[in-house]
Structures are given as structure tokens and as C-alpha cells.
């Protein structure tokens, strides 16, 4: 079979059950006889290997200057594997999308479909509430295409990964340190907008004067007259602020969460015991924010909540998705971002064991790794953990430990903490699993935040410049020497999961996406009235930040 580029090399390796490091594929493609070198590499892969490493390719290339002349040796499987279908007799027998998703034994990934080539139904594009299209995938074609773009132009940078950086001991001083850091960093975005005074200084001022303060929301309560009393706290103490119910900004009060940072200006009462609020400011994303875009046409697929190990994991939909990634319809998709919950986990909610297909947590990750093999090896993958994953529940969550990483070596993925800022060719993506969305939706009025429109709940986190502002609620927060949950820099894209609902829109030019899930409705979800959006993959054009949603279920 003639090799026409990187995609063909990746497809051939996948047919034998292997993924490959990107540099290894590049070395094979750049050789004088890629087909012969690939055949020798396949023969030289250790029996227990899942990934073709760069050093192996170099060793095989340097072992002999005369290439093997028998092209049929490319199809010889490594010891211990079944022979894949013949691929060189005619164009019609070239590797199908289904055969590219096979595992090491020539069968589809664990707990998947029966191995038949799925053919999703076609039909008209269905408009979403955000105005973009939800399109059925096109999975036709021979699958022998070359993925578009020059892989040398790819660039992935990570900011804010706290894996291995945890210093919290749970002592009182750790909690003080994290809140001081939050107030300092978010307060710096607000102090230039008000004539800021510390709480203790305000307490000493004469009545009737103008005053401003930046602080953490310590308490929110309503008065008998229907006004609102908000207590702000800074490093020196607390001071009460009264929001009159007839003021134009009174509607912002029901958006407030305890422990978020904001600024207020107002007038002291005659006895200087309280301040009447005249204006209120949030750290917020500037309305003038201009997002960065890529210099070429390149796409990223944003997904989350795979939940391998659940009886309701949608293996067929996942395989249809990974098959689609091997087609020309996905030729511009060069990045895959997964926002947590790779597996279903164990003991996450009551009676979960009754809904598990795989009851051992490590076997769940092994199965997830098998499914990950279906993703083309020339796609960059970035993953963060979620609340179902085998990491600490308290946020920020470090990336997977070495043992779990070792179970997921079939694809050369970048694994970072939750949250992390990932920059793809200049486009910054804030990846956060999204547990705090439950709290935002529960605390705010239904018209301002709901599960049906999860992206609107995300808007409030952008406005507060913090992914989980409220401490002591549903979201578990770990005290560290710095607050890793502060949104220091405005992202171009904000990507979350967790709530199993699809939604996207723009807030001050920041694209907010909640990407749905790959799990059908469980009995637990029925009990809490969650109807998931399953089997969707939002595809973002990094050069325009336009979104197209592909449906695979």
C-alpha cells in the first residue's frame, strides 16, 4: 500500500493496535522509503508496547541503510496479534474507519459495538438556541486522507497547571493565605475604579462623606423594608453596605455569591455606621476584549464527561465520533480537549455500583485508554480531571498521578490540572470541569442561570473572574498558598462540562462552551431530573471562533 503522508502512517499503526509519538511518525514520513521503514518498525515493536516511540524509529532507521523491499511486510502483525484485513489488493479494500479504531487484538475497543461500520443518519442541520448548527457527521470516504495543515505549526502551551505544586496542609493559615491571595489579585482589577479605603479606615471616617471599598462578600441579607445589606470584608475587617431596593443596580444583588470579590462606592450615614451604595463593580471581562485567533484554518474538538465504566456509557456514539475523526470531514481537527470525567468512577453517588459496567476503577481507565486508541495519533489531546476521576475532589484538582498516566499511554495526551489555561496556536482556552456550575445554578434566579442554558451560568463565573467563588457550599475547595481558581487573564474560550448539557454563546467576546457528555441518562440522573445532551462534539474554528456541533448519537 503506498504511503501518502502522515495520516496513512498513523492509520497503518492503528490497524496493528499501536499509537505513536508525533516525532516518530514525522521521522517515518521523512524517510526515503516510508513504507519499508514502517514495516521494520512494526516488526521491532515490543510485544507489550502500546505506543511507537521516537527512539525505536531512530534505532530501526539506523540499524540498516538498505530498506526492506517487500511492501507486504507492512501488513505483518507483531507477535500475539491477529492479522488485520488485507489493505493492498485494491482501493476498495483500504482500511476503513472502523478498522482504524481496532484495539490490539483486532477487535473494537472494550465494551464497544459489534465491530460493524456505523453509518449515522443524515438529515438537515438542526439549529440550536445559540444560532449555530448541529450537523450529522459525514463518515464516508476511504479514510486515506492526509490531515490538513503543517504539524510543525501546532503549538500547545499550558498556564496554571498546579500538578505537583500543592502545598496546602488544611491548617487555618492556609485558608487565610488563599483568601488574601484572591482579594489581592482580583482587588487589583478594581481599586483603580473606586477611591478605595480599608474597612478599619472607613470605620474612623466622619458621617456623610463619600467612600469606596474593595472586599470579599462576607454576608448578604435582606432587611424588613426589602432593601439589601451586604457586608464586605478585607484584610483589616468588615463594613456593611446598604443597597436600596429602588436603585438601578439592585438587580445585581441576586447574582452575588459569598466570597466573591467586588467594589462598592457610596455615602456614609450620618453616624458613619453604614454606607449607602451608589455604584457596584465586578472584576468582570472588559467589554472591549478582543479575542486572539489562529493564523491558519485549524479546528479543536471540545468534549467532556466520557464516563467509561458506566452501563450508560455510549460506546457506539464514541466509536462513531473517533471514526469521523479519520475522515476528510474532520481534516482540520488537530486538537481534542477533554474537560474531565474520563471514567464513571466508584462511590461517587449513592448506589452507583448498581449502574456500573466496570466496577474496578483501574479497569475503567484501561477501558478508557482502549477507546482513546480510536482517536487519530496525529491529533493533539489535552485532558483535565473531573469529580468522577480518581483524583482529590477538592479544587484545584491536580492532573492524574503516574500510575493512572501509565494506564493511559496509548495516546500521547497532555494531562494537566483542573482548571488550567491551554493556549492553542495563540488561542487561550480556560478548561474547567465545572462542578461550581451546580452552585451557581442553585443560588441564582432561574432566568439568570439554568441547566438548560449552562453557558449562561458560565457567564457569571467570567463576570466574577473566578471559577468557584463560594467557599463552604457544594463545591469542595482546597486551600493553597495561592488561589488557582482565579481567572487572571481573560480567556478566548471558556470550556466546561460536568452538567451534561450542551450550550454555548459569547460573553464580552469570550466563547463559553459546555460540551455535553457521552453517557445516556442514568437512574440517578432521572431521580434529580437531569436529561443529558449525549453524543455531541462542539467543533471550534480557531481562526474565527465559530462553532459547529456534530452529533454522533
Image (cartoon, helix red, strand yellow):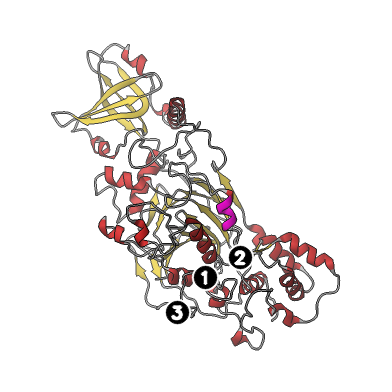
**Residue 324 in view here:** yes
| Residue 406 on the magenta span | yes
Main secondary structure type of the part rendered in magenta: helix
The quadrant in which residue 172 appears is top left
**Mark 3 neighbour class, 10 Å CA radius: few under 14, some 14 to 19, many 20 or more:** few
- The reply to whether discs 3 and 2 touch (Cβ–Cβ < 8 Å) is no
Label located before the other in sequence (1 or 2): 1
Taking the view exactly as shown, the residue that stands out farthest to the left is 225
Q: Is residue 121 above or below residue 109?
A: below
**Mark 1 neighbour class, 10 Å CA radius: few under 14, some 14 to 19, many 20 or more:** many
* Element carrying mark 1: loop
Compute the Cα span from label 1 to label 3.
18 Å
**Residue 492 in view here:** no
**Residue holding disc 1:** 109
**Mark 2 neighbour class, 10 Å CA radius: few under 14, some 14 to 19, many 20 or more:** many
Q: Residue at x 85, y 69 (%)?
A: 64
**Residue holding disc 2:** 377
Q: Is residue 35 above or below residue 176?
A: below
**Residue holding disc 3:** 119
Q: Which residues are magenta?
A: 403-407
Q: Residue at x 73, y 72 (%)?
A: 43
Amino acid at each position: 500500500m503506498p504511503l501518502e503522508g502522515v495520516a496513512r502512517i498513523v492509520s497503518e499503526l492503528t490497524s496493528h493496535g499501536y499509537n505513536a509519538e508525533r516525532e516518530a511518525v514525522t521521522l517515518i514520513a521523512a524517510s526515503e522509503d516510508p513504507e519499508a521503514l514502517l514495516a521494520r518498525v512494526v516488526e521491532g515493536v515490543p510485544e507489550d508496547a502500546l505506543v511507537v516511540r521516537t527512539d525505536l524509529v531512530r534505532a530501526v532507521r539506523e540499524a540498516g541503510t538498505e530498506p526492506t523491499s517487500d511492501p507486504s511486510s507492512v501488513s505483518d502483525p507483531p507477535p500475539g496479534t491477529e492479522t488485520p484485513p488485507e489493505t493492498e489488493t485494491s482501493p476498495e479494500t483500504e482500511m476503513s474507519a472502523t478498522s482504524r479504531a481496532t484495539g490490539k487484538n483486532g477487535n473494537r475497543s472494550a465494551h464497544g459495538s459489534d465491530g460493524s461500520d456505523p453509518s449515522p443518519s443524515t438529515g438537515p442541520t438542526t439549529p440550536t438556541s445559540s444560532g449555530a448548527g448541529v450537523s450529522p457527521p459525514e463518515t464516508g470516504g476511504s479514510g486515506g486522507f492526509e490531515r490538513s495543515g503543517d504539524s510543525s505549526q501546532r503549538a500547545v502551551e499550558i498556564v496554571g497547571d498546579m500538578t505537583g505544586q500543592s502545598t496546602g496542609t488544611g491548617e487555618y493559615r492556609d485558608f487565610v493565605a488563599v483568601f488574601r491571595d484572591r482579594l489581592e489579585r482580583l482587588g487589583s482589577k478594581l481599586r483603580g475604579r473606586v477611591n478605595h479605603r480599608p474597612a478599619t479606615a472607613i470605620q474612623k471616617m466622619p458621617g456623610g462623606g463619600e467612600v469606596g471599598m474593595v472586599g470579599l462578600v462576607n454576608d448578604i441579607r435582606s432587611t424588613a423594608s426589602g432593601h439589601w445589606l451586604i457586608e464586605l470584608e478585607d484584610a483589616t475587617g468588615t463594613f456593611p453596605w446598604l443597597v436600596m431596593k429602588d436603585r438601578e443596580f439592585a438587580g445585581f444583588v441576586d447574582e452575588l455569591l459569598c466570597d466573591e470579590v467586588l467594589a462598592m462606592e457610596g455615602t456614609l450615614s450620618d453616624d458613619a455606621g453604614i454606607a449607602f451604595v451608589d455604584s457596584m463593580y465586578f472584576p468582570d471581562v472588559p467589554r472591549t476584549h478582543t479575542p486572539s485567533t489562529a493564523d491558519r484554518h485549524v479546528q479543536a474538538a471540545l468534549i467532556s464527561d466520557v464516563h467509561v465504566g458506566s452501563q450508560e456509557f455510549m460506546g457506539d456514539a464514541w466509536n462513531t465520533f473517533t471514526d469521523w475523526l479519520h475522515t476528510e470531514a474532520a481534516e482540520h481537527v488537530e486538537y481534542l480537549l477533554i474537560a474531565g470525567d474520563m471514567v464513571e468512577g466508584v462511590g461517587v453517588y449513592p448506589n452507583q455500583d448498581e449502574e456500573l459496567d466496570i466496577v474496578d476503577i483501574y479497569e475503567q481507565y484501561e477501558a478508557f485508554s482502549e477507546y482513546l486508541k480510536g482517536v487519530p495519533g496525529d491529533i493533539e489531546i489535552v485532558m483535565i480531571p473531573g469529580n468522577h476521576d480518581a483524583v482529590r475532589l477538592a479544587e484545584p484538582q491536580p492532573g492524574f498521578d503516574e500510575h493512572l498516566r501509565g494506564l493511559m499511554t496509548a495516546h500521547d495526551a497532555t494531562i494537566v490540572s483542573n482548571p488550567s489555561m491551554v493556549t492553542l496556536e495563540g488561542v487561550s482556552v480556560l478548561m474547567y470541569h465545572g462542578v461550581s456550575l451546580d452552585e451557581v445554578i442553585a443560588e441564582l434566579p432561574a432566568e439568570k442561570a439554568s441547566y438548560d442554558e449552562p453557558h449562561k451560568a458560565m457567564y457569571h463565573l467570567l463576570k466574577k473572574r473566578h471559577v468557584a467563588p463560594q467557599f463552604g457550599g457544594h463545591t469542595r475547595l482546597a486551600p493553597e498558598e495561592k488561589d488557582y481558581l482565579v481567572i487572571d487573564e481573560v480567556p478566548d474560550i471558556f470550556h466546561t462540562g460536568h452538567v451534561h448539557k450542551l450550550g454555548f454563546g459569547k460573553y464580552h467576546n469570550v466563547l463559553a462552551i459546555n460540551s455535553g457528555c457521552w453517557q445516556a441518562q442514568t437512574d440517578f440522573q432521572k431521580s434529580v431530573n437531569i436529561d443529558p445532551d449525549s453524543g455531541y462534539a462542539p467543533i471550534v474554528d480557531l481562526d474565527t471562533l465559530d462553532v459547529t456541533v456534530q452529533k454522533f448519537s
